[in-house]
Image (cartoon, grey):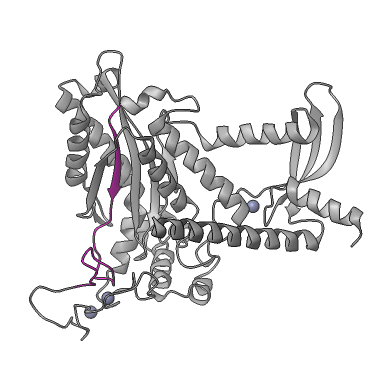
Amino acid sequence: MNSHERSRIVQEVNEAGRCSHPVRLNSTQVNVRTGEITSKVLKVACKDRREAVCPACSRTYGIDAWIVAATGINGGKGVSADVVDSPRIFVTMTAPGFGSVHTVRPNGRCVQVPSGASLCDHGWPRACGLRHEEEDRLLGLPICDRCFRYRDAVLWNAHASRLWSVTMLQTRRNLASRLGVPRMDLHRHASVHYLKVAEMQRRGLIHFHALARLDGGELGDATSRGSDLIEAWTDAVREVTLTNKMGRFQWGDILDIQTLGKRDGDARVLASYLAKYVTKTAGEGLELARQFRSRRQIRLSVNNPHLRRMATEAWDLAADADCLHLNAKNHAHTLGYTGHLMTKSRKYSTTLTALRKARSEYRSKCVSGEILTGDFSYAGRGYDDARSELLVDLLVGWERQARSMASSSTSRMGEKR
Ligand SMILES: [Zn+2]
Ligand SMILES: [Zn+2]
Ligand SMILES: [Zn+2]
């Protein structure tokens, strides 16, 4: 490879933000200041959030998610710094149980059965006496897969988003009655803003983490009413039930609500925690990263037997007359979950779109010194030169190595202290 080729490859990779599968766009660009027009094929980053699909884009997505999460509780990017004086909470809401799965309880043990029959109807022990390590492949698998209610579990995932919306409505209703104001006037006294992230647990069920804050309104200052927000939310989680011909859907017993202190560190840690989830995929690799094209593909590609069964169950729901509107086939890879991974109420903070727009304007300014606008049409995927892909793989590997060396040296320093 000569030096000209080398620099062309490096430039191509850098322009695409080190993306593993850039999108090729035919472009006609106009320089906003000079009016000059240029045509060329652009390689732009795929912007996939999933680490397993594109490490570089996933990292950028995680950083943006971090900014969106942190500014809503700490201020910045258009959110007032005064939000640190508002009551701010971190909420975790979980799915109910659909059958015992191998797990690690706070005491380090798996499933214990206090009394009753020691074997299930299928002849399996109901309890598990093991203490599972973090990487144990048994974690998340049912103790008896014939006892596990797969259909109910997938249907719960399919209703989780709706359950969230109804719960938020009920929280606001409860808050209005606690503050003694009509529901329709609540926004003039207090408003609840949140960012929520859906996490796929190992058992294949969705649970939600949310950062929320309570702001005052034009008629009242609710910022001393943090405990009312917590109680309104807790009551809503306990009260809300969705019922239709597919079943009855409620939250699980585990609800955790923590109040955030005024320290900046709280916001940073929680925002990192949420940002970590948005770059993950269910399962171990790419098997659940994209929509399935056939039932057979699920059988052949998903290694984890429990997640395979969940995905198949979701696929099969599409044939069930009661569940037709769920469009379950399209959500077999998300095990029935139909919602977005990260959503927020409008006034919580800035948006991912705004951050992306600012970055792309900054990049185009860095490349050409000018802001460019123009027409773009899809022309395919990937780099012109296969060696560009090799370079991306190398860079990803180095970066990963550097990060793991940095984190192990930080933890060694922690041990020394
Ligand atoms: Zn990418
Ligand atoms: Zn176990
Ligand atoms: Zn059983």
Magenta region, main secondary structure: loop
Q: Is residue 398 visible?
A: yes
> Relative to the observer, which residue lies in front, 233 or 109?
109
Q: Which residue lies furthest to the front in this view?
A: 417
Q: Residue 53 sits in which quadrant?
A: bottom right
**Above or below, 241 relative to 224:** below
Rendering coords of residue 43 (x, y %): 75, 48
**Is residue 183 on the magenta stretch?**
no
**Above or below, 352 relative to 409:** above
Magenta span covers which residues? Answer: 86-111
Q: Residue 265 sits in which quadrant?
A: top left
Q: Which residue is drawn at 27% across and 35% down?
A: 169
Rendering coords of residue 90 (x, y %): 30, 42
> Relative to the observer, which residue lies in front, 315 or 129?
129
Q: Which residue is drawn at 80% across and 29% down?
A: 30
Q: Residue at x 36, y 69 (%)?
A: 134
Instruction: Specify the quadrant that holds the N terminus.
Output: bottom right
Q: Residue at x 78, y 29 (%)?
A: 369
Tell me: 110 left or right of 312: left
**Is residue 100 on the magenta stretch?**
yes
Rendering coords of residue 125 (x, y %): 20, 82
Q: Which residue lies furthest to the top in this view?
A: 219
Rendering coords of residue 314 (x, y %): 40, 64
Tell me: 234 left or right of 404: left
Q: Which residue lies furthest to the left in this view?
A: 115
Tell me: 124 left or right of 284: left
